[in-house]
Amino acid sequence: MEKEIKDLFKFKRAYYKNREDFFDFGLKEIEYHVPELQELDKKKDEHLYAEIADVYIWSSMLLLNDKVGKEIVLARVKKFKAKTLEYGK
């Protein structure tokens, strides 16, 4: 799956002049999805999962756009785990 997202990123990134334009568009795409996710969840609509996948793809492409390494993502995973242990949520 990682290769497919990298390939998609290269394809989509070619349509933008610079890092900022791609970032701004990607962020708008993620923002657009949030209310839709909430609505689909309320309706118990299974299309919710396709839309969550879209957010995952956009988030992944934004990381690729800034060449963010796996070590940052793994550090965040570690932080999530620590907070869960600390707060129980």
Image: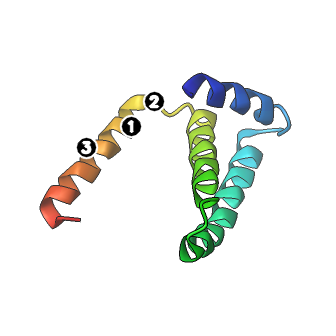
Amino acid, disc 3: Lys
Total tally of numbered discs in the picture = 3
Q: Quadrant of residue 4?
A: top right
Residue 69, numbered circle: 2
Q: Position of residue 64 (x, y in %)?
A: 59, 33
Q: Position of residue 55 (x, y in %)?
A: 60, 52
Give the crowd class for mark 1: few <14, some 14-19, many >=20 residues within 10 Å: few
Q: Position of residue 17 (x, y in %)?
A: 83, 38
Residue 89, numbered circle: none
Give the crowd class for mark 2: few <14, some 14-19, many >=20 residues within 10 Å: few
Q: Which residue is mark 1?
A: 72
Q: Are marks 1 and 2 in contact (CB under 8 Å)?
A: yes
Amino acid, disc 1: Ile
Q: Are marks 1 and 3 in contact (CB under 8 Å)?
A: no
As measured in the structure, the alpha-carbon distance from the residue carrying label 1 to the one carrying label 3 is: 10 Å
Mark 2: secondary structure: loop
Q: Which sits in the foreground, 37 or 28?
A: 37
Q: Which sits in the foreground, 59 or 45?
A: 45
Q: Which sits in the foreground, 55 or 68?
A: 55
- The chosen color scheme is rainbow
Give the crowd class for mark 3: few <14, some 14-19, many >=20 residues within 10 Å: few
Q: Earlier in the sequence, mark 3 or mark 2?
A: 2
34 relative to 65, above or below: below
Q: Position of residue 60 (x, y in %)?
A: 57, 40
